[in-house]
Image (cartoon, coloured by chain):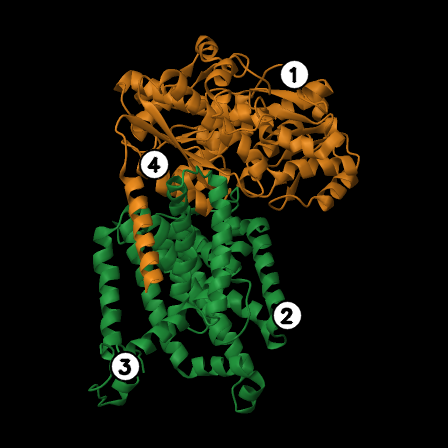
Chain colours: A green, B orange
């Protein structure tokens, strides 16, 4: 009843090839963007910005990057935390050595540095696949951990190893308030997500998907594996690097190498797997799930305990959080192995028929 | 349909309950947040400290009804020693209570670095007793940081003074080899500039040996130590790294009495797991020893015997439990100092900061509070946010800690130029104009 395409005719190829061909989809997307940009800044508290919105927006950009590599090109990667770190430290070094550059220009340029590093660490993918590639990218992660700690010029020879981001401003306009931070991260994420969505619908994206589905057959029909795999690593690392620089500059402000360790890689991988491999929407849904659920559990469990007269200590809440979160991950993967994005498309399919059963 | 309706109804009731629980809030209460870690690799050391901090506040509430009639509201938030969770806890708790959080005490150098960026904007002081940035003792640059009782450069200097005393004079340090086995994080790296400066001045060879976090794997580092044979090993670890270090030292037969840990590596959880390998191990004290001070009489009466203590029986009287007590004592005394100027009502973060900056704990007051023998007199000024530069050394004999030295005072002729230099660099980088303390009241 609500979600019918009847009466929507396309009169041009351009209209037919739109990202959202159905008018209702376009409307919902527009409404979401309006709410995200124009409504949220007026109704949100600082805590929700700092604890929920800003991390979700930045990590969904990183999850989109990892989805490009794992979901669209099928290359397993456990090194995403290190690439985030490369982006962060590259942006920091650009800010330190070229102080006339605006911090946001540094963040964009750091994406290119991360892409170059990703290219180098993507070379093993030309020879090895699957589980073995996971191990090779794990080596990239540990190499990143070591490099950020030991190579002194990366942290500008600070004695503590902890570095600070420059103050965020554009043309003298201070952007350090939570609302400004949120809007800046949202702009980066929306623009880059739009770019990536178009890349994966184009010939490069189709090459990636061909490599993912059956790389030998792809090679036979003329897809060059080296080009496809290395471009996947480059684009993915660019996105992850920009997300890492945003994470460091906008969210943390001051960070040490432990902020980009193996746990960050696992967190991104869980986002992509739970959200849905090979789906931009899935990356965003996965990011929301992974970030919001622990905070929700942390806040909801003590009052729930109080309802039954049980004073739960913070340690117990932490343990419960881990247990319930893990159980939810298993539950979702059992119920829908293709992730939350698949649940969303099933919902849309059912919505087409609604209110009829068939 | 019936089950679905019942589930939806239940969810509605639960959410209503959560919203209602959040809405209730008293007005004449001072909110004190506690960033703790009771889980993770650093929990063995985090738990007794958190218990001590909570118990002291509980005692003040039970015995005095709070501070000058204002009840204290203490809430913990689990950080797991992770910087991002620490930041999330900070954001969640900073606005709670009628006047917001009084002060934050993250007990983690990593979280301190992150909060040092945020606290000035939110106007909440950071109490980083015995940890954090060593240069944050310069109150002209770090207006909101209070590394009371001691910083890592003080610790490094006192350790070298103790070694010099054992060797028979500073001139005997020439040619000696002193290794620093440190946790590879901002916390572990803090003493390095001070130790390098002292190694240049006194002529000893300084050998830094990093241990990757969390530090339970140290075999290769101790093989290196066995090879290099340093005269002394300074241990700068936390959590499981400490007990692993003492155990490994026993395994390679490095004399434990030539190991000196910093005050965060000198507590019961660091030596008990090592068993009899721990005997002889020395550590610096954050002024206070293990054991029960006069304040324990009130603690026993109002908190422990009432079953309100969070601590297990063997924790009470331990080094880190005492440290938690002192941490809360310093925070509440700052609130009391602020109330003396601003009135007996809940204090804002700015007012508590004023309280910290004018904190003057004389020997008389320390005795009144029941902490005699624990800490020396402390005077915080605008320029000096450390307040005191004292430390002592204690030694584990297998069963308990015994104080084996007199009071040492850190040598400011070495430390002052370092502090000015590094804090000046920070101010330049962050574009902060330093205050001029001679102009302030």
Q: Is label 3 in contact with label 4 (beta carbons under 8 Å)? A: no
Q: Residues within 10 Å of mark 3 (few under 14, many from 20)?
A: some
Residue labelled with disc 4: B120
Circle 2 residue? A132
Q: CA distance from mark 2 to mark 1?
A: 57 Å
Residue at far top of view: B364
In the rendered image, residue B112, in percent from the top left (x then y), is placed at: 45, 38
Q: Secondary structure at mark 2?
A: helix
Mark 3 on the same chain as mark 2: yes
Mark pair 3, 2: CA separation: 40 Å
Q: Is residue A261 left or right of residue A292?
A: right
Contact check, label 1 and label 3, Cβ < 8 Å: no
Q: Secondary structure at mark 3?
A: loop
User: Quick check: marks 2 and 1 in contact, CB under 8 Å?
Assistant: no
Residue picked out by circle 3: A21
Near-viewer residue (A70 or A300): A300
- How far separated are the C-alphas under marks 4 and 1? 39 Å
- Distance from label 3 to label 4 (Cα)? 50 Å
Quadrant where the C terminus of chain B is found in the figure: top left
Q: Looking at the image, which residue is at 68% across and 46% down?
A: B217
Up-down relation of residue B90 to residue B202 (above or below):
below
């Amino acid at each position: 009843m609500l979600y019918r395409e009847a009466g929507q005719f396309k009169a041009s190829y351009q209209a037919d090839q739109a990202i959202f061909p159905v008018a209702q989809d376009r409307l919902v997307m527009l409404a979401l963007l309006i709410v995200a940009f124009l409504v949220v800044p007026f109704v949100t508290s600082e805590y929700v910005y700092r604890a929920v919105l800003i991390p979700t927006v930045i990590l969904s950009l990183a999850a989109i990057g990892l989805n490009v590599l794992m979901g669209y090109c099928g290359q397993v990667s456990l090194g995403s935390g290190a690439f985030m770190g490369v982006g962060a430290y590259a942006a920091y070094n650009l800010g330190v050595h070229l102080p006339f550059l605006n911090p946001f220009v540094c963040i964009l340029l750091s994406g290119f540095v991360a892409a170059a590093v990703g290219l180098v660490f993507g070379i093993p993918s030309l020879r090895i696949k699957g589980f073995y590639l996971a191990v090779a990218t794990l080596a990239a992660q540990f190499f990143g951990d070591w490099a950020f700690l030991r190579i002194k010029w990366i942290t500008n020879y600070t004695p503590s190893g902890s570095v600070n981001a420059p103050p965020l401003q554009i043309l003298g306009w201070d952007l350090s308030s939570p609302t400004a931070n949120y809007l800046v991260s949202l702009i980066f994420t929306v623009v880059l997500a739009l770019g990536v969505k178009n890349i994966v619908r184009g010939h490069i994206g189709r090459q990636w998907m061909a490599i993912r589905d059956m790389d030998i057959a792809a090679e036979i029909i003329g897809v060059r594996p080296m080009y496809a795999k290395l471009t996947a690593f480059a684009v993915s690392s660019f996105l992850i690097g920009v997300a890492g620089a945003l994470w460091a500059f906008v969210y943390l402000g001051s960070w040490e190498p432990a902020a980009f360790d193996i746990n960050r890689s696992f967190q991104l991988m869980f986002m992509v797997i739970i959200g849905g491999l090979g789906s931009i929407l899935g990356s965003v849904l996965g990011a929301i799930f992974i970030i919001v659920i622990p905070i929700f559990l942390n806040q909801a469990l003590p009052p729930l305990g109080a309802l039954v007269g049980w004073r739960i200590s913070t340690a117990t809440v932490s343990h419960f959080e881990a247990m319930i979160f893990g159980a939810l991950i298993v539950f979702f993967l059992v119920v829908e192995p293709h992730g939350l994005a698949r649940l969303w498309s099933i919902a849309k399919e059912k919505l087409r028929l609604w209110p009829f059963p068939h | 349909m019936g089950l679905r309706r019942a589930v939806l109804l239940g969810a509605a009731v639960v959410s209503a309950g959560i919203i209602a629980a959040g809405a209730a809030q008293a007005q004449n209460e001072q909110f004190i947040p506690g960033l703790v870690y009771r889980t993770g690799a650093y929990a063995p050391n985090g738990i007794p400290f958190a218990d001590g901090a909570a118990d002291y506040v509980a005692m003040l509430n039970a015995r005095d009804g709070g501070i000058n009639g204002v009840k204290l509201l203490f809430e913990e938030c689990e950080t797991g020693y992770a910087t991002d969770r620490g930041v999330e806890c900070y954001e969640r708790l900073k606005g709670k209570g009628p006047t917001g959080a009084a002060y934050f005490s993250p007990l983690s150098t990593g979280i301190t670095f992150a909060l040092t960026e945020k606290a000035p904007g939110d106007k909440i002081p950071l109490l980083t007793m015995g940890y954090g940035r060593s240069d944050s003792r310069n109150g002209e640059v770090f207006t909101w940081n209070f590394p009371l009782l001691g910083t890592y450069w003080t610790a490094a200097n006192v350790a070298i003074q103790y070694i010099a005393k054992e060797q028979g004079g500073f001139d005997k340090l020439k040619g000696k080899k002193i290794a620093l086995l440190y946790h590879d994080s901002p916390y572990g790296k803090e003493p390095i500039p001070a130790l390098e400066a002292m190694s240049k001045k006194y002529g000893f060879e300084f050998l830094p040996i990093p241990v990757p976090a969390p530090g339970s794997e140290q075999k290769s580092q101790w093989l290196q130590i066995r090879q290099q044979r340093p005269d002394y090993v300074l241990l700068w670890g936390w959590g499981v790294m400490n007990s692993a270090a003492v155990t490994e030292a026993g395994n390679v037969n490095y004399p434990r009495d030539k190991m000196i840990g910093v005050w965060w590596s000198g507590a019961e959880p660091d030596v008990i797991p090592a068993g009899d390998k721990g005997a002889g191990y020395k550590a610096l004290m954050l002024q206070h020893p293990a054991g029960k001070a006069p304040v324990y009489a009130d603690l026993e009466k109002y908190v422990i015997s009432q079953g309100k203590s969070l601590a297990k029986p063997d924790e009470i009287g331990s080094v880190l439990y005492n440290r938690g007590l002192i941490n809360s004592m310093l925070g509440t005394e700052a609130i009391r100092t602020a109330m003396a100027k601003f009135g007996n009502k809940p204090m804002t973060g700015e007012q508590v900061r004023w309280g910290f900056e004018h904190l003057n704990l004389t020997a008389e007051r320390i005795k009144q509070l029941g902490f005699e023998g624990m800490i020396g007199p402390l005077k915080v000024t605008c320029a000096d946010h450390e307040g005191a530069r004292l430390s002592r050394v204690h030694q584990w004999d297998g069963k308990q800690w015994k104080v084996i030295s007199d009071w040492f005072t850190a040598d400011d002729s070495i430390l002052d130029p370092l502090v000015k230099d590094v804090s000046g660099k920070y101010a330049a980088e962050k574009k902060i104009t330093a205050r001029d303390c001679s102009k302030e009241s």
